[in-house]
Image (cartoon, rainbow, N blue to C red):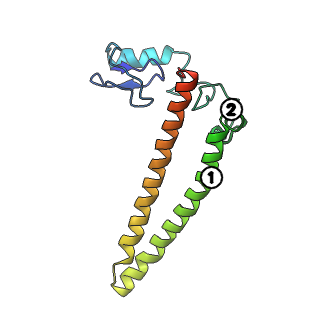
Amino acid sequence: MKTCPICGNINLDDGIFCGRCGESIAHVPSQSMEGAVEARRLDDSSTLGFHSSPQCFICGASLPSGKLTQLWSNPHIESVHPEWYRYHKSWKTWFRRFLITSVLALVVSAPVSLVTKYYFYAPVAMAELLLVVAFYQIHQWKFYNFRFAWEREHGKIH
C-alpha cells in the first residue's frame, strides 16, 4: 500500500495518483497495510484523512473551525477568492432550481406514464436528471480549472 504524502490517503500499490487528492504517488514506496495504517495514525496532520482544522479548498489556508457547510460560505472564500464565491453562489441558485424542476418532472411524469400508458414522459424526465448530473460535472470542471489557475498564479498549495 502507498500512503499519499499530501492528504494521507492509503492507495493501492499499482496507483500512480492519489485517489483522493490526485497527487502523484509514483515515487512513494510501498509498505504493508499495517505499516500504512500505522504511519497514518501517527501522522499529526491527518485524522482519518481529514485535517485537524478546516482548510481552504482553493489555497490551503487554515480556516476557523465550524460547520462543514461553512467551508463554501466562509468569509475567507468571499474575501480572498471573490470570483469563485460569486460564481459558486450563482451556480448554487441555478442548480437548485434545475434540480427541483427535474425531480418534480420525474415525480409527476412517472404516475402519468403508468396511467396513460404513454411512456414518453418518463424518459424525458430521466434525460433532465442526466442533465443535472452533467451540470454538476461542468461545475466540478470549472472548480478544478479555477484552482489550477490559482495555483499557477500563486504557487502550488501543498
Instruction: Determine which of the numbered discs, if any, sits on residue 121 in the image.
Output: none
Q: Identify the residue at horizontal 41%, vertical 29% (top origin).
A: 22
Pick the front one: 128 or 82: 82
Q: Where the N terminus falls, by quadrant?
A: top left
Residue 72 percent location from the top left of the image: 63, 41
**Quarter of the image where one finds residue 27:** top left
**In this image, 34 relative to 64: left or right?**
left
The amino acid sitting under disc 1 is Ser
Mark 1 lies on a secondary structure that is helix
Mark 2 lies on a secondary structure that is helix
Q: Are marks 2 and 1 in contact (CB under 8 Å)?
A: no
In 3D space, how far apart are the residues under numbered discs 2 and 1 (Cα atoms)? 18 Å
Q: Identify the residue at horizontal 64%, vertical 37% (top origin).
A: 71
Q: Is residue 30 above or below residue 82?
A: above
Q: Identify the residue at horizontal 65%, vertical 35% (top origin).
A: 81
The amino acid sitting under disc 2 is Val
Residue 91 percent location from the top left of the image: 58, 52
Residue 34 percent location from the top left of the image: 36, 17
Instruction: Determine which of the numbered discs, if any, sits on residue 90 in the image.
Output: 1
**In this image, 44 relative to 73: left or right?**
left
Instruction: Determine which of the numbered discs, if any, sits on residue 80 in the image.
Output: 2
**Quarter of the image where one finds residue 129:** bottom left
**Quarter of the image where one finds residue 122:** bottom left
